[in-house]
Image: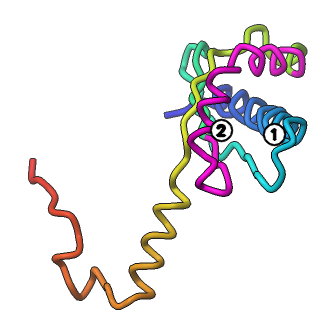
Amino acid sequence: METQRQKKIARVIQQDLADILQRAVTEAGAQGIIVSVSKVYVTVDLSMAKVYVSIFPNDRAQPLLSEIKKTEPQIKHQLAQRTKHQLRRVPELTFFLDDSLDYIDSIEESLKGGENPIENRDLLPKRKKS
């Protein structure tokens, strides 16, 4: 269960990181790429933050994510400059690719097509009983 403080810090980090990342992509001259921060989870001790990044178009997502991971110290520094009046210490940032939109698309495509997992149970992956 997240505390109010964790949620507040996560919102601050999410807003500022979204701006930092989108500006970096624009300044790099990459046209037509949209970067958004879909969710940020902060640990209880506020030392680490998991940042889920959504990148459009999908074919550019993996190379761009690896570039973001390489420049993490610079991104953290920019975040520290922006949040110096709100946070004493900026948490360690760990970036992940948010693939929830792809998952939703695959569900919609399978429902639009002739493949209906409700009618044909064989389409669903078998789950192990614990």
Q: Give left or right: position of 81 versus 130.
A: right
Counting from the top left corner in percent of width and height, residue 124 is at 23, 70
Crowd rating for badge 2 (residues with CA inside 10 Å; few <14, some 14–19, many 20+): some
Judge whether 21 appears above or below 114 on screen: above
Q: Quadrant of residue 32?
A: bottom right
In the picture, the disc for residue 34 is none
Is residue 69 left or right of 125 when viewed as pictured? Answer: right
Which residue does the image show at 90% across and 36% down from the upper left?
A: 27
Q: Residue furthest left?
A: 129
* Image point (87%, 37%), residue name: 23
Magenta: main secondary structure:
helix
Q: Neighbour class for label 1 at 10 Å: few (<14), some, many (≥20)?
A: some
Q: In what element is the residue under mark 1?
A: helix
Q: x, y (%) of residue 108? A: 47, 77
Q: Look at the numbered discs 2 and 1 and tell me whether their residues touch, using CB distance below 8 Å.
A: yes
Q: Which residue is mark 1?
A: 25
Give left or right: position of 34 versus 19: left
- Which amino acid does the dot numbered 1 rest on? Val
**What residue do we see at 72% from left, 27% from top?**
9
Magenta stretch encompasses residue 62: yes
- Picture quadrant of residue 28: top right
Residue at mark 2: 64
Q: Which residues are magenta?
A: 53-82
Q: Secondary structure at mark 2?
A: helix
Q: Callout 2, which amino acid?
A: Leu
Residue 128: x and y, percent? 11, 53
